[in-house]
Image (tube, rainbow, N blue to C red):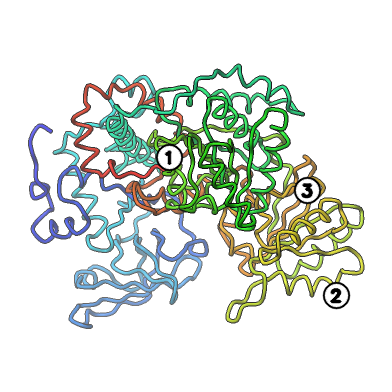
Amino acid sequence: MTKDFNLSDVKGVGPVTEKKLNDLGITSLSDLVNFLPCRYVDLDAPTFLDKVEDGDYVLLKLYITSISKPYKIRGSLLVRANGKTDKGENVKLSWFNASYVYKTLEANEFIRVFGKISIEKGYQLVNPKFEKFQENFTKFTGISAIYPLRRSIPQQTYAAIVSDALKKSNLKGFIPKEVEKEFNLMEYENALNFVHMPESIEQGKHASIRIELDEIVKKACAYKALNLDKSRQNVYNVEIGDLEPLISSLTFKLNESQEKAVCKIISLLKSKKPLNALLAGDVGSGKTVVSLISAYFAILSGFQVAFIAPTEVLAIQHYNNFVNLLDHFQINVSLLTSNVLLSKKKKILKELKEGQIDIIIGTHSLLSESVKFKKLSLVIIDEQHRFGVSQRNMLITKSKNTDILMLSATPIPRSLRFIMLGEIDYIQIENRFSKSRVKTRIVPIEKSSDMYKYIVERCREGAQAFFIAPKIYDCEGIETANVDRLYKELNEKIGKEVKLGYLHGKLSLSQKQSILEDFHSNKISILISTTVVEVGIDVPNANLMVIFDADRFGLATLHQLRGRIGRDGKESYCFLLAKNEDNERLEMFSKMESGMEIAEYDFKARGPGAWYGQEQSGYFSSAFSLPISYIENIGEIVASIDVKTMRYELLAYALSHNLDKVSIT
């Protein structure tokens, strides 16, 4: 800045307004111009009242049918008016402490009004801006920025304050000019102007993203400065070529995407920096085989590997796969779950502590304090979104300097934030099949009988289906579908035409395995289940799914469930039944095909999560969340900035923003 301006130096900021700004967290000129719009309104676009939602900002042409004299109500002076749109829709107008409105407006004339509409008790506008209607002139034109002011300061007042602040400030961005040019970024100074006074909504959005990019790059560089002296302790003394015997023994050939993922993970394990990577790929993309090869690499170097899965069924499936694929390589693989006999568990714990077990695969049982390792180096966390922050940390802290590989089809917002921070390496595996093979449809309740008929016909031809319910049994006070009731009702309706089975977490392990074997061999046509089938169930012939009360499930769970079908590449259908069919989340889900699309939507809806602590969702300060597609760009931008030359400045920034307390898992 050319001069150190205070808030009080800005035109329009007196003691009362400054206090209100302070209450919003704005204490400096920098805070003021970095307090970004939460949305924009195009004043040149027509407003249709039948399309608006409560809280939208609207611009309307109204015919004033009546206007009241100012009168007192609860200590305030109130003026009321009634208006009609060209379509005859009634709109109530109210102005508090604005007696000039009565002197300015008259009944039986046209006006333009702009403000925040309430539709709960009919269309209403409180304290809207207005002007008398003129055919060829209006002050309501262009793009209007809307700020999250919590009604403390009028929007128009804040816009004027920011406009003057921009003239007085000379704020510079963190990203150097030469890096801006290298990556073809909008100049930071232009972004500050465009974000508050854009010529189009798109321009405002891009400017907001550019400003957030600057903040995230600075955080990433600060975090990098904190960890400049951090180096790997576990040294892997084998090379990628040593993996060839295992890779060539596989019954299938790795595709190009899987090969790239293996090479990336091995290069990270061989680097000076400890591995902290997210292996992302849709259901069936081959994340497990990539993690198996990575585990083998660690074992060849003399280390132990822990592989944790969210369910016993999935842990057993991984155990069987690992045993089969490593059968000829003298690798000791063990399984630890809550159903392992006590005598066998003691033996496993002893061998694990003595280093006789190379790979331990298990569920939450691996988190127990009694589980100790001799030389643990690599922790693999499957279906990362199914574990909380503290649970992931419990396993990782069982050994110092542990390398971490997380697997997920739909990364949680928190992990996406740390990918952007540069502390988690992002590795993507592409799909085996065309994404469009699975069609998702929202089915109205009145059409459910047609859906049942279609599924029965398909099953009689040899197809199979999953029916998913949120609960096992009826629960008093909770109206929702459940496995027990569905099985009984459907058995009466269609039980004579197709064979039904049911599955849930209360069944014993042997019961679950028996039912799954019957389903896999097509002795059961329709399996009615809870989300216990969300992961680890591979029945290629199952190409139909119905999810009851779909609005009760999270997006990641819906995507994992949908991943149970279409695994043979054939066309499949996932039907969503919901009591509230007008559901934006389900509408979006039905259009999204990849896990990363869903993760990005979840990222925007839930926010990125806390930088430290255990929250896995939470909001960032800017208007538009940085798109996930920027992840690779951020890493490249950070790599092009010389952190060492500004290390102490960045360390001060890191400590002031609590980045030293960041929990990266």
Residue that carries the numbered disc 2 in the rendered image: 492
**Front of the two marks 2 and 3:** 3
Closer to the camera, 47 or 346?
Answer: 346
In the rendering, at what x and y percent does residue 21 appear? 18, 56
User: Dividing the image into 4 quarters, which one contains the N terminus?
Assistant: top left
What residue does disc 3 label? 539
Viewer-side residue, 176 vs 321: 321
Which mark is drawn over residue 597?
none
The residue at the point 59 percent across, 60 percent down is 553
Asked which secondary structure carries label 2, the reply is: helix
**Does 245 sit above or below residue 445?**
above
Mark 1 or mark 2: which comes first in sequence?
1
Q: Name the residue under label 1.
A: 399
Q: In which quarter of the image is residue 23?
A: bottom left
For disc 2, the neighbor class at 10 Å (few under 14, some 14 to 19, many from 20) is few
Q: What element carries label 1?
A: loop
Q: In this view, does 159 lie to the left or right of 585?
A: left
Q: Residue at x 78, y 41 (%)?
A: 568
Name the amino acid type tagged 2.
Glu
User: Which amino acid type is marked by label 3?
Assistant: Val
Structural crowding at the residue carrying mark 3, measured as other residues with C-alpha within 10 Å and reported as few (<14), some (14–19) or many (≥20): many
Residue 267, x across and y down, in percent: 50, 22
CA separation in Å, label 3 and label 1 = 37 Å
Q: Which residue is painted at 24% across and 60% down in the image?
A: 154
- For the residue labelled by badge 3, is the local secondary structure a helix, a strand or a loop? loop
Q: Is residue 42 left or right of residue 559?
A: left
